[in-house]
Amino acid sequence: MSQPDKRALLAEGLAAGDDDVALHARLVGAGVSAAAAKYEIDRLAKDPMAAMLRRQSARMAKQGWLFANLQRLAFEADGGFALDTLDRPDADFFYRHYYEPNRPAKLTGIVDHWPALTCWSLDHFARVAGDAAVEAQVERERDPDYELAKDDHRRLVRFGELIDWLRRDEASNDIYLTAYNSGTNAAALGKLWDDLAPIELLDAARPRDGFFWLGPRGTLTPWHHDLTNNLLVQVMGRKRVRMAPPWAFARMKNSHHCFSDWGNAPLSAGFGDAGAPPVLETIIAPGEGIFLPVGWWHQVEALDLSASMSFTSFCRPNAHVEDYVSYGRL
């Protein structure tokens, strides 16, 4: 019978905030003799790595206390833990009460002036840019980590061929033209910008700074948080958006980069529990948008053939990605 790894057990206990009594019980419970457990714990008094782990554990415990209080305040707020809908919001009001406090909101009436709401269709796309070569994410269904491995799924296709495939109206998560492909597609799909117009909430000095999304019903963007504030606007079809707050970090099972191990799980809307995060849920239809603040976890599912635009060009600094450090496996 293999011997338990005492150092690994000690490290797990220290990271969990165990005191010496709890550490001793952890070791003995794993099959270490009482005498050997006492010897290992006595050695920790002179181990600087153990001291650092204990300090870090205390910091994490205080962070957990702070997050718990943020949750309490959110649940006790007027209206409770809910997603507000703002119709034609005044820009100053939006920035003061939603952007700056890091608070999501569903938005209506902000793109009623867009010609795209009436002219965008697969036929229109074919007429405007059907012969263009575009980049899309393909063969996603064979790879459970398709979002993490986006570069492996990049393919150039003729836009008209993608449109013909979408005409079949089959539910699929296998092909999706996303914001990640926008660098390649900016010129190819540039004419589509003629169907859009400035949004009052965004920086007027960057009128064509946005990202195009097109895919069938069934496309899924798994649980993750963005590294910027984002505005997602629906033009064709509907999308279901689920969100979880940054203060639910411990329950979001973040083990790599900005992605959650919940993946595509349809977490239920509500207050959550000890294992699952609180979740807000809404459906955005053509002409509606949603403000996704930086750090808010979200999952997006297309309920229909879907075309969307997303924007990061707010009237505030939004370069949070510049000082982000990807810690790899957490």
Image (spheres, rainbow, N blue to C red):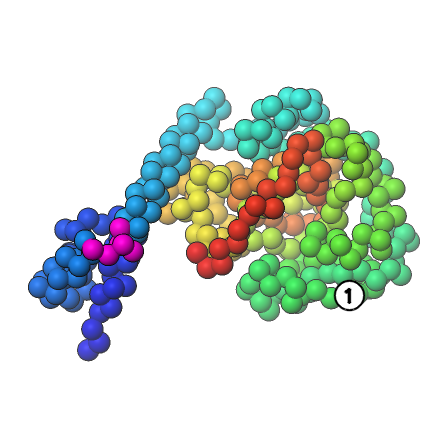
Query: Callout 1: few (<14), some (14-19), or many (20+) C-alpha neighbours within 10 Å?
Result: some
**Looking at the image, which residue sits at the far left?**
35
Compared to 246, does 73 lie above or below? Answer: above
Task: Kindly identify the residue that appears in the image at 25 percent across and 64 percent down.
Answer: 7
User: Looking at the rendering, which quadrant does residue 209 occupy?
Assistant: top right
- Look at the image and give the residue range highlighted in magenta: 46-51
Magenta residues, dominant SS class: helix
Q: Residue at x 57, y 45 (%)?
A: 323
Percent x, y for residue 275? Answer: 37, 47
Q: Is residue 10 magenta?
A: no
Screen quadrant of the C terminus: bottom left
* Left or right: 262 as drawn, with respect to 117: left
Q: Nearer the viewer, residue 289 or 230?
A: 230
Is residue 80 visible in this depiction of the protein? yes
In the rendered image, residue 48, in percent from the top left (x then y), is placed at 27, 54
Residue farthest to the bottom?
1
The residue to which callout 1 is attached is: 156
Disc 1 element = strand
